[in-house]
Image (cartoon, helix red, strand yellow):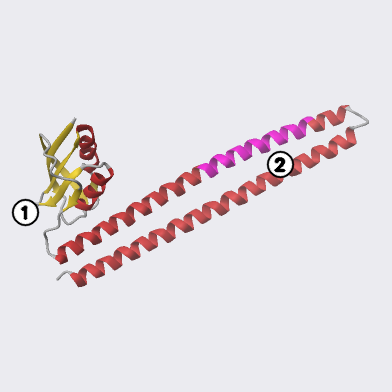
């Protein structure tokens, strides 16, 4: 069912890139309307669309994610007017303030990218550990197989020498697998740690540069 929602958001929601955040969500949800700052320090959202879609918007914007902290959301539902054909971000402040906020948006995206990369690297590390466990299991099975072959070689006089030789080769293969697993795991973990350190340094550098730009742009 189509509805019109008049929303007012309280908290640390201005000069933090919050309107850009709402604009992106509303765009992805195909809602029509606008978002803008009010003089009392709140953010106003007026949108029209399906009731379930508006509910999804309300869930997604109710966040505490630096530098944004939503403390309360008031919603009034009305009949839709159909006056909006798209969703608009209204900027009525001066250029300096708008520039400051856009820098905050850029910093937030950088932090999110760094967090996502770190999570993917942690996931990769977990998969490597699982792979290591499987290789340990394979090595154990090879050792068991080598023991059975040695036992069988002791009971078969004619084939004993050949089976002992085969058992020895299987043991060597098991040792090589263990050695390769240790080397691969160590190298990948080292690369993961180096990559994460590099990303953290780049994020810190970019945030310092943004802070310097703000200091020069804003009196």
- Quadrant position of the N terminus in the picture: top left
SS for dot 2: helix
Q: Residue at x 36, y 53 (%)?
A: 113
Crowdedness of circle 1 by 10 Å Cα count: few (<14), some, many (20+)? Answer: few
Q: Residue at x 74, y 43 (%)?
A: 173
Q: Is residue 194 left or right of residue 172?
A: left
- Residues 40 and 92: in front is 92
Q: In which image quadrant can residue 39 be found?
A: bottom left
Q: Nearer the viewer, mark 2 or mark 1?
A: 1
SS for dot 1: loop
Q: Earlier in the sequence, mark 2 or mark 1?
A: 1
Crowdedness of circle 2 by 10 Å Cα count: few (<14), some, many (20+)? Answer: many
Q: Where are the magenta residues, as a range?
A: 127-148
- Residues 205 and 16: in front is 16
Residue 163 lies, in percent from the top left, at 85, 35
Q: Residue at x 58, y 42 (%)?
A: 132
The residue at which mark 2 appears reads as 174
Residue 82 lies, in percent from the top left, at 14, 40
Q: Is residue 168 above or below residue 106?
A: above
Mark sitting on residue 131: none
The residue at which mark 1 appears reads as 39
Instruction: Tell whether position 130 is magenta.
Output: yes
Residue 149 lies, in percent from the top left, at 80, 32
Residue 91 lies, in percent from the top left, at 14, 57
Q: Is residue 189 left or right of residue 160?
A: left
């Amino acid at each position: 069912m189509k509805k019109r929602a008049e929303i007012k958001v309280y908290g640390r929601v201005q000069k933090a890139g919050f309107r850009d955040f709402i604009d992106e969500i509303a765009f992805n949800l195909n809602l029509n309307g606008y978002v803008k700052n009010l003089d009392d320090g709140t953010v106003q959202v007026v949108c029209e669309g399906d009731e379930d879609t508006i509910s999804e918007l309300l869930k997604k914007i109710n966040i505490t994610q630096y530098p944004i902290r939503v403390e309360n959301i008031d919603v009034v539902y009305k009949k839709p007017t159909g006056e909006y054909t798209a969703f608009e971000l209204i900027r009525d402040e001066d250029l300096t303030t708008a520039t400051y906020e856009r820098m905050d948006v850029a910093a937030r995206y950088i932090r999110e990218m760094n967090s996502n990369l770190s999570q993917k690297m942690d996931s990769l590390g977990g998969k490597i550990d699982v792979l290591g466990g499987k290789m340990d299991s394979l090595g154990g099975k090879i050792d068991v197989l080598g023991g059975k072959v040695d036992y069988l070689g002791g009971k078969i006089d004619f084939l004993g020498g050949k089976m002992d030789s085969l058992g020895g080769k299987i043991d060597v293969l098991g040792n090589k697998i263990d050695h390769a697993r240790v080397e691969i795991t160590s190298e990948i973990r080292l690369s993961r740690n180096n990559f994460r350190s590099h990303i953290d340094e780049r994020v810190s550098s970019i945030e310092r540069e943004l802070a310097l730009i703000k200091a020069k742009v804003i009196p």
